[in-house]
Image: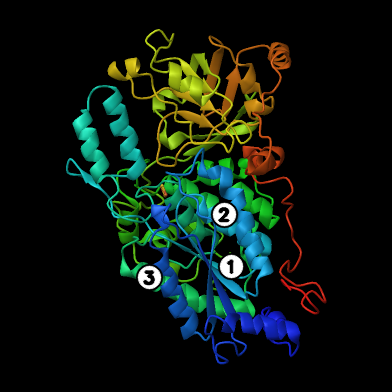
Amino acid sequence: MSLRSAAWFAGDDLPGFLHRASLRAQGLSNAALSGRPIIGISNSWSELVSCNAHFRGMADAVRRGVLQAGGLPLEFPTISLGENLMKPTAMLYRNLMAIDVEESLRSYPLDAVVLLAGCDKTVPAQLMGATSANLPAVMVTGGPATPAIFHGRRLGVGTDLWRYTDQLRAGKLSRQEFAELEQAAMPGVGHCTEMGTASTMAALSEALGVALPGSAAIPAGDARRYAAAESAGLLAVSLARSGPRPRQILTRAAFLNAATVLAAIGGSTNAVVHLLALARRSGVPFSLDDLDEVSARTPLLVNVRPAGEHLFEDFFHAGGVPALLRELRPLLDTDALTVTGRPLGEGLSTTAPPDRRVIAALDEPFGGTGGLAVLRGNLAPDGAVIKASAASARLRRHRGRAVVFDSVTDLAERIDDPSLPVTADSVLVLRNAGPVGGPGMPEWGQIPIPARLLRDGVTDMVRISDARMSGTAYGTAVLHVAPESAIGGPLAAVRDGDLIELDVPGRRLHLHVDDREIQRRIADHPPHVPAAPSGWARLYRTHVLQADQGCDFDFHQPDTGPDTTALPDGLLSGWHGGW
Ligand code: FES
C-alpha cells in the first residue's frame, strides 16, 4: 500500500522539493527521507500537567521503536489538559484538544500516529481526534504515579484527599497535619493512583483495543512503561502500511467490551461521557441505556479505590487488564479487533491467573452488579448517572427535601452556614453546573456535606447536579442530569423543600411536583445561559451537546467515510503551503 506521506515527499516537483527541504532544515538526510513511513508522536507533554511531565522520555522510547522498524518519527505538541491547574475545568477544553489532534493528523504528512496521553481528558481527546481523522493510531498512556504515603498509608490522590478534607472540616484533622499531607501528597509524575478517570480511561483504551495489551496499568516510573512505548513505535510502522484504522477497531462490540470493563473496575463516571462522545465520532450506536444494561449484568471484580482498597499499580502487579479480561471472557466479545491486528481474546487463555486480592473471579466478585446506573424520571428525562458502587447502601432508595444551590458560588457561600435548613435526610441540589451552565460541566457533583453534619458524624447524603464528579470521589451523587438546568432542564424548577425521590434499583429520579407546576416554574424563570461574548467560551456554549450525548460539539457529525485523511486531488500541486 502506498504511503499517505508520499503525496508530500515523493513528487519530483516544486512542492516535493519544498516539503523535503523543510525537513532537511532539521538535519534529516536523504536516507531518512527515502520513503519511510512517517510516524507522528502526538505528545501532550507539559510542565503545567505533572501527570504528563514524563512524556519527553516516553516520546524518546516511541522514537526508538519507530526507528527500529524503519520508520521516521516526527514528534509534535498538542495542547495539554491538566485537572489540577486548568480552570474552570479541563473538560471545557477536551473538545479543543480533540480538534487540535484531529486537524494535526489531517493536515500533516503522517502515515500513523502514537498518541501520548495521561491526565484525565487527554486520553479521550487524543482518541476523539484520531478517530475523526481515522489515521492509524496506537494509544500509550502515562501510567499511575508513585503513591504518596501519609500516616503510614499509601494514598489514592483524590480519594484520600477528599476524606482528609472532610476530616479537616469536621475538626478531626489539624491544620498542621493537613500541611504535612500537602508535602506528601504528590511524590512524583504520572496520573492519579487510584481508579480515577485517568486510570479508568487507560484501562478502557486497552479494552477498546486501541492500546497495547498489558500496557494500561504499568506504573509511570516502571521501565516496562518505556518498553511499551517502544513497542508502540514499532507497531505504528506496520499500522502505517496496513492498518487497522481507528474506526475499524472502534465498533459497537468494542464499546460494549469497554462498558463491561468500566463496570468491572468500578471506573469513573466521567468515562460515560467520554465513551458516548467517542462512539458518536466512530459512528457507532451506543447509548446510556447500553451502559446501564452492561453494568446490570457485570459485577465489580477489581478491588481498587474508591470502590475498593488497593491502588492502580496493585492492579498492574495483579495481572492488569489482560488478567481482568481473562475473568470477564463470558461477558465479552473476544473477537473484537485490536490495534495489534489480532482479536481481543487472543492469548487470554494462557494469561496467568490474577492475584485474587485485587482481581476477583467472575463467580466470586468483590461487589454486585449495577455499579453504574442510569436514572430517568421527571428530573432527568434524558438521563442521569450514579456510581452506585460508591454510594451508601441505605441511600440508594431515599426520599428527602431539597436544599437548592443556584451555582457553585452560592454553594460555597452557604453550605457551612449554621442557619442552613439542612438535615442528614435532605437532598442537596446544585444547578447551573452542566456543559453550558458550568461551562464545561465541572467536577462539582460531589457536593460537600455541611460541616455541621460532618461534625455530627454524617458521611454521606443524596446529592444531585448536572455537573460531573471526580473519578476518585465517592458518595451518593446523582450526576450528569440531562437536559441541564441552564438550558431549561427540570432541575431549574426545584425549590427548597420539594420532595425528591431517588430509587437506584428502580432507575428512577423523581421530583414530587406536578408536571404542569414544573413547566410553570421553568417558564417563570427562563434559562440562564451565562454570557460568553466571544472566543472559545462562545463557541463552546453555542455548540456543546448534553451529557447524554457525550458533550461533544453538534458540528462533529459522525463521519463514516473510508478515509478522511485522503487529500483532495491537486491539493499538493502548485504554489500551496505557505508560499
Ligand atoms: Fe491528572 Fe488526576 S490530576 S490524572
For label 3, the residue is: 226
Residue 162 screen position, x and y as percent: 34, 34
Above or below, 149 relative to 318: above
Which badge, 2 or 3, is on the more N-terminal residue? 2
Amino acid under label 3? Tyr
Asked if labels 3 and 2 touch by Cβ distance under 8 angstroms, the answer is no
Q: Is residue 126 left or right of residue 575?
A: left
Residue 171 screen position, x and y as percent: 24, 22
Above or below, 168 relative to 127: above
- Mark 3: few, some, or many residues within 10 Å (few <14, many ≥20)? many
**Pair 1/2: label in front:** 2
For label 1, the residue is: 337
Q: Residue at x 51, y 50 (%)?
A: 121
Above or below, 185 relative to 171: below
Residue 49 screen position, x and y as percent: 42, 52
Q: Residue at x 57, y 70 (%)?
A: 113
Q: CA distance from mark 1 to mark 2?
A: 22 Å
Question: Any mark on residue 125, and which?
Answer: 2
Amino acid under label 2? Ala
Q: Is residue 198 left or right of residue 23?
A: left
- Mark 2: few, some, or many residues within 10 Å (few <14, many ≥20)? many
The answer to whether the beta carbon of the residue marked 1 is less than 8 Å from any atom of ligand 1 is no
In this orientation, does residue 557 appear? yes
Q: Quadrant of the C terminus?
A: bottom right
Amino acid under label 1? Leu
